[in-house]
Amino acid sequence: MTESNQQVAIATLAGGCFWCLEAVYERMQGVQSVVSGYMGGTWPDPTYTDVCTGQSGHAEVVRITFDPRVIDFAGLLRVFFTIHDPTTLNRQGNDHGTQYRSAIFYHDTQQLEVARQVMAEVQTQLPRPIVTELTPAATFYPAEPEHQHYFAQHPAQSYCQYVVAPKVAKFEQHFPQWIQPRA
């Protein structure tokens, strides 16, 4: 069954702090849920503290459940490459360390091929090489409850104001057609 015939699909992306990606994708049409968590490391059941040390090898990720009839994987990736800098190794702004790396954790060969195509397309628009990792999806560990829906719960917090909000605004500016209508 191809992605376009499925009712639901999963994407797992790392692009710096998971609060930023979560805030954007929660506003996107076709996205059914976004869960912040960890993937790509060696420690079982990592905590936020473990991941922040850089010792566990995990990246901060979001697991996106989406309806590919509304938004396809390529669309998710175009947003991903717009809202973070895929040319900085293990860094997004002031956040640095392997836990903040840019990565696409693909769930099947179709996602891998789409990721390669979108990366090639995006690379033509960037002055530096993309360093985003393409890695098979591994065990996903949900982050602690206090990290879920963080921007929605803490919009006045300084990190949210200065880091997360500009990424949300960038999404809204570049992709108004994909903004989820507010209830």
Image (spheres, helix red, strand yellow):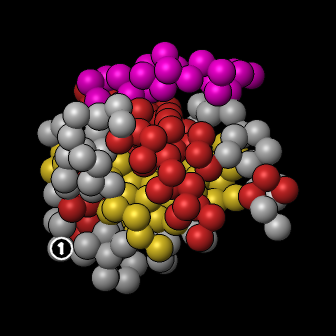
Would you place residue 67 above or below residue 155 in this image? below
- Image quarter (top left, top right, bottom left or bottom right) of the N terminus: bottom right
Residue drawn at x 71%, y 21% as measured from the top left: 181
Would you place residue 138 above or below residue 161 in this image? below
Q: Main secondary structure of the magenta part?
A: helix
**In the image, what residue type sits under mark 1?**
Gln
Queried whether the magenta region covers residue 26, the answer comes back as no
Residue drawn at x 20%, y 55% as measured from the top left: 90
- Does the rendering let one see residue 102? yes
- Does the rendering let one see residue 84? no
Instruction: Give how far across and how far down residue 82 sits, in percent.
Output: 41, 33
Q: Quadrant of residue 121?
A: top left
How many badges with numbers are in the image?
A: 1
Which one is nearer the viewer's eye here, 147 or 15? 15
Which one is nearer the viewer's eye here, 110 or 157? 110
Q: Quadrant of residue 54?
A: bottom left
Would you place residue 29 above or below residue 131 in this image? above
Instruction: Give how far across and how far down residue 160 sits, in percent.
Output: 33, 30
* Left or right: 105 as drawn, with respect to 101: right
Queried whether the magenta region covers residue 164, the answer comes back as yes
- Image quarter (top left, top right, bottom left or bottom right) of the C terminus: top right
Q: Which residue is mark 1?
A: 55
Instruction: Give how far across and how far down residue 123 sits, in percent.
Output: 35, 41
Would you place residue 161 above or below residue 105 in this image? above
In terms of secondary structure, where does tag 1 sit? loop
Instruction: Give how far across and how far down residue 120 sits, in percent.
Output: 42, 47
Which one is nearer the viewer's eye here, 38 or 12? 12
- In the image, the segment drawn in magenta is 161-183
* Left or right: 26 as drawn, with respect to 83: right
Residue drawn at x 63%, y 64% as measured from the top left: 110
Q: Quadrant of residue 144?
A: bottom left
